Image (spheres, coloured by chain):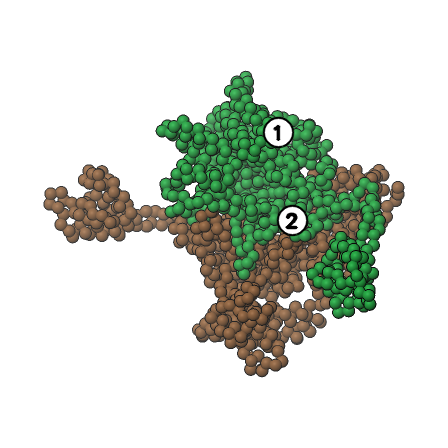
Chain colours: A brown, B green
Amino acid sequence: MADSKFETILAPLRAAVKKQGDLVRSLKENNASDMEVKKAVGELKVLKKQLDDKELSLQPPSEIFNRSKFADLMIRRFFYDQSFSIYGGVAGLYDFGPMGCALKSNILEQWKKFFVLEEQMLEIDCSMLTPERVLKTSGHVEKFADTMVKDKKTGECFRLDHLIKNRLETLIKDKKQTAEVKEECKDIIIKLDGMTTEQMSDIVNKFNMKSPTTGNELSEPVDFNLMFATQIGPTGDQKGFLRPETAQGIFVNFKRLLEFNQGRLPFAAAQIGNAFRNEISPRSGLLRVREFTMAEIEHFCDPSDKSHSKFGDVENIVMKLYSACNQMDGQPPIDITIGQAVSQGMVANQTLGYFMARIYMFMMKIGVTKEKLRFRQHMSNEMAHYAVDCWDAECLTSYGWVECIGCADRSAYDLTKHGEETKQRLVAERKLPVPKSIQVTELEMDKGLIGKTLRKDSKECVEKLSKLTIEEIQQIHKFIDNGKPDSATGLTLCKIGDKEFNISKEMIPLRSYLKTVHVEEIVPNVVEPSFGIGRIIYTLLEHTFKIREKDEQRTYLSLPPLVAPLKCCVLPLLDNDKFTPLVSTLSKNLCQKGVSNKIDDCSGSVGRRYARTDEIAVPYCITVDFDSLVEPQSVTIRERDSMEQIRVPVSDVIDLIYNLSQGNIDWNVAKDKYPKFDSQQATE
Amino acid sequence: MADSKFETILAPLRAAVKKQGDLVRSLKENNASDMEVKKAVGELKVLKKQLDDKELSLQPPSEIFNRSKFADLMIRRFFYDQSFSIYGGVAGLYDFGPMGCALKSNILEQWKKFFVLEEQMLEIDCSMLTPERVLKTSGHVEKFADTMVKDKKTGECFRLDHLIKNRLETLIKDKKQTAEVKEECKDIIIKLDGMTTEQMSDIVNKFNMKSPTTGNELSEPVDFNLMFATQIGPTGDQKGFLRPETAQGIFVNFKRLLEFNQGRLPFAAAQIGNAFRNEISPRSGLLRVREFTMAEIEHFCDPSDKSHSKFGDVENIVMKLYSACNQMDGQPPIDITIGQAVSQGMVANQTLGYFMARIYMFMMKIGVTKEKLRFRQHMSNEMAHYAVDCWDAECLTSYGWVECIGCADRSAYDLTKHGEETKQRLVAERKLPVPKSIQVTELEMDKGLIGKTLRKDSKECVEKLSKLTIEEIQQIHKFIDNGKPDSATGLTLCKIGDKEFNISKEMIPLRSYLKTVHVEEIVPNVVEPSFGIGRIIYTLLEHTFKIREKDEQRTYLSLPPLVAPLKCCVLPLLDNDKFTPLVSTLSKNLCQKGVSNKIDDCSGSVGRRYARTDEIAVPYCITVDFDSLVEPQSVTIRERDSMEQIRVPVSDVIDLIYNLSQGNIDWNVAKDKYPKFDSQQATE
């Protein structure tokens, strides 16, 4: 019922997107000018955004997220908070407190198990400091920039496109403006994405824009590179940057990795580490920061064979895919198996599809809400020019759909670029299906003859000869054929490199023969899943944030035990020394099993302490009471989400908590096995 | 026998150290001038170095480490190598390849289990980018610098003290120099450590020193800060650095951490992460680099109580301690229990001793050679002025004794400094043994009266009054008592802050009363164990590097299974499709158990493949042969160090490898349980 009502509301918006999408298609087909296409695409984006926003606004109220309560929990229990806040804080820098750090650690551990271990990837750990030349080659020095303007008096900086958009949107809302002006503003906003710096600068002047915070004059636009620059070494002549992504470290190590893999393709390398982007105006908490942890995979494969040997394991997985085509048509994402998506050509190849499915499985494993995860395909205008296909795993948060993971087929771009710049052969060998015969011509110098003839000059002559190409040698042969050899010696004065020597053809014979080759060289293609760990953490925290029914004040996080910061809390029922030995023993034994836990022996009722452990997402509590001290010893185990309690013999408890926290067994299994707990029998 | 012969050789060197140590002591006792003490200490260091060098040179030949074979293995199997080497490389930057990265990961995992989990520490993860003000407060902006000179033509930089020392040592060896010059050079080298930049500059001029690589003129000395500087944000007015250590991130979060710990002391916070030092001339491979991983612990405790509740667990552990006193006396380190060392006062307190013992246990667990680990106490001249006591865990490598871990009692220095700079109360509360009554005097403004009297000025007056101290209010009272109040209003014109107001004593009465307080504020002291992870990895690799007896070409690494990069390798005996299903199943089941493993199905004899797995420290190989395909299925397990082989049923193998690789059971236990393997029965 609700769905069909929503669809009625959305129908005109969908139709508008489709109409504009069709216009873009036809412009492209008819080779319209770049500017025309850009304008149409810009308008398409605006319409898509309106559709998205409307869809989000139709969410049922129970789904509305209480961001202030959430933020309060994050800061109060120090999941994360702004860095250096006793010094006033720095925008875009965050510290993870004990619980945030443990959550991050657990997510990364699962990531390593799921990707590195299960897929036998080669994990490496490269330097963050990166010399300028590497990032020139990768394109980051030139292209990784935003255009900004500065407040002439205070020096405050604004991203030029944001500034213009915000100002024009204000004008559009301003009742004093004429319909004509408003129309012009709308038109500019639509075209903004494709404008040059000069065009944007003209708009700033035309509308006489000032600093939005002070009203001061603004500077001319300047390009600002988003990388943090520094100097490596004391001389000041080795410029470096903090890496803006971890991928380049893998590309520059390609040869070593291929060798480690004994020359065989395909293989994947992975890296977890920090990267840095000097955002002009960081915002949205953990979503847009200046220092962040990434986990990136570069899967190197044969460009002519992008099948994946394990694709069969995932082909029946159903995912929510939002293809470029559906986006152009104003249609919603569809649920489809990855097998179908690849066979229909919606997803470019099996390898890309395989990784999308693995990403999906990973996100489910760590506890992301299934309905709030979709894969959105880049439209051709969003995609880097070298990419073949690119899908973003997007998660729905209170900030809208947020890109958490990119998954792109980057073709041979990176290896080719680094190879050209360094003159290294960043290639692999491919076995030919059948060996092939090729004509080879080689120079076979007669060094004995050269030595005897040229004596002390022979070494230099040989050196220069060995630098010549076969074509150059052939030209020398021609030159000798057409020249006049010295009648006494039979030698001809020939230019070899930058010097002349008296030589004969006999000294430099060419030999041609057929050679059988079994391999050919190829530049591997790269499929790159790239995970923004901070964004995944943020999403997961939002998705698992809950408020207890009937008690607005009690908030908790329903993180899966596998990634929960602490797996267990051990509580004495009361502040009584009699409980201490058993409480300590249980905690110690859990540690030995590798189960992270803490003792909460603070004063306060058990109920209050449960509420406190709920806030930090502890899935299980073990409570020691007077019954626990009586043979046969037993304790209460309480589960966080259901608040259900069972009574378990002390002898079973460590293994039970271990298996529950590893996800080996589920709470329902434990509930079936052990009696429900109501109240203790014994008292002091 | 050997030992006593060595002691005879070392005796005169020990005596020389002792004599000089006694001189230093007596100079200090007699309040000799700073310069005199520094010179004597410098000479003491030279003598200590001579003693150390001689001791090292007396090592038996079997212990001589083959560094070139070692380096070859590290690079060939890509444990680690220089970063960006296809771009020519950058000095002091290294990438860890798949095996190095896994080793590092495993060491850090063990570290977390051993420290964070077992000691219930609060692990956090802070920003690397750090604003300048934080590092000014910590002292790094001012003091974290080396003095250098530049080659005037090439710009090459040299550390000034290294340059002088190297040049003078050359002169000392030069036969053409007079005895007088040589004596002067020796004298300068001894004093060098305590010299000012001006004094060193004079020496450069006096000896007319030039660039050692080009012979060019040198610049005047300049201070070079070892931190990497950058700009945070686009405005260019927020200078920042890459952190030179992780500790500051913990100190600036002290308040949040204390609160997370519900206000209770002692507690420890920990952090693992990268730090950066822009070394002038990096060298010695992984030992002196520009980017490195640290793991630091800050244990916050009551300054008046540095006992440790778990000290009893470690007090009987025997460690090799090299006290400052023994160093001054030319004596070797001694083996002593940490309990004795603390009770004798050699180690300052239980908390420091507890962490030293835990460090020792950790280093043993990951496989450092016991005889190559010592704890050396800083002599008073080496210690930061705020430190109470400091011990370095040093490991013997082919570069000599290398500091891998520092363990210092830093007193209240860091919290005091950050507290002063930020005006934040970085303190904890200590419960008083008995509540205490204190006299409290408070200003109780009569705001109603002030308002009625001063009207529009009242707000300003109240503001200024509230900034005054009690003493200043008392002075105003006195001023009113001694002055002449206006006869009409009864008011006196008084200066309050920077302005005058007509007031009366009735407006600003003081109230004194007795208050019972249960707590007092203290600035916690900090005990800091600080681990250099790269150095520990390097040490461990050196300590476990082995060459097979009788086969010089076969090298291997005897890393403990717990930290070995891969725990297991699964090999089919031959390149035969029949083996594939079992090989894959075994590998997959190992993965599911979390046991890192790889399949080696490359061609080559099993022996050659074993040798290859030995090189990457794989402790166990599972070999699938024709017998494995016959019921009851069994496989061969081979152990790396002993090269022994046993035959194990397939049904047992996963659990066996898991338990072996976790260190739950030992190879000897497995050998007792399963038959030795000689050769397979079945063939194809």
The Cα atoms of the two marked residues, 2 and 1, are separated by 35 Å
Q: Can residue A25 be seen in this view?
A: no
Q: In this view, does B396 lie above or below A145?
A: above
In terms of depth relative to the viewer, which is nearer, A148 or B156? B156
Image quadrant assignment for residue B311: top right
Q: Is residue B40 above or below residue A23?
A: above
Q: Is residue A680 visible?
A: yes
Judging from the image, mark 1 belongs to the subunit labelled B
Using a 10 Å C-alpha cutoff, classify the residue at mark 1 as few (fewer than 14 neighbours), some (14 to 19) or many (20 or more).
Answer: few
Q: Position of residue A510 (x, y in %)?
A: 24, 47
Q: In which quarter of the image is the N terminus of chain B?
A: top right
Q: Where is residue A654 in the image (x, y as percent from the top left)?
A: 74, 41
In terms of depth relative to the viewer, which is nearer, A158 or B465? B465
Please give the name of the residue rendered at 58% of the width and 35% of the height, measured from the top-left corner.
B381
From the image, tell me which residue sits under label 2: B418
Please give the name of the residue rendered at 47% of the width and 33% of the height, measured from the top-left corner.
B188
Question: How many numbered circles does the render carry?
Answer: 2
**Residue type highlighted by circle 2:** His
Q: Which mark is residue A616?
A: none
Q: Label 1: state its secondary structure.
A: helix
From the image, tell me which residue sits under label 1: B29
Please give the name of the residue rendered at 50% of the width and 54% of the height, measured from the top-left corner.
A229
Looking at marks 2 and 1 on the same chain, the residue that comes earlier in the sequence is marked by 1
**Residue type highlighted by circle 1:** Glu
Q: Is residue A400 above or below residue A431?
A: below
Q: Position of residue A283 (x, y in %)?
A: 61, 62
Q: Where is residue A132 in the image (x, y as percent from the top left)?
A: 46, 53
Please give the name of the residue rendered at 55% of the width and 55% of the height, measured from the top-left corner.
B239
Q: Label 2: state its secondary structure.
A: helix
In the figure, is residue B197 to the left or right of A435? right
Judging from the image, mark 2 belongs to the subunit labelled B
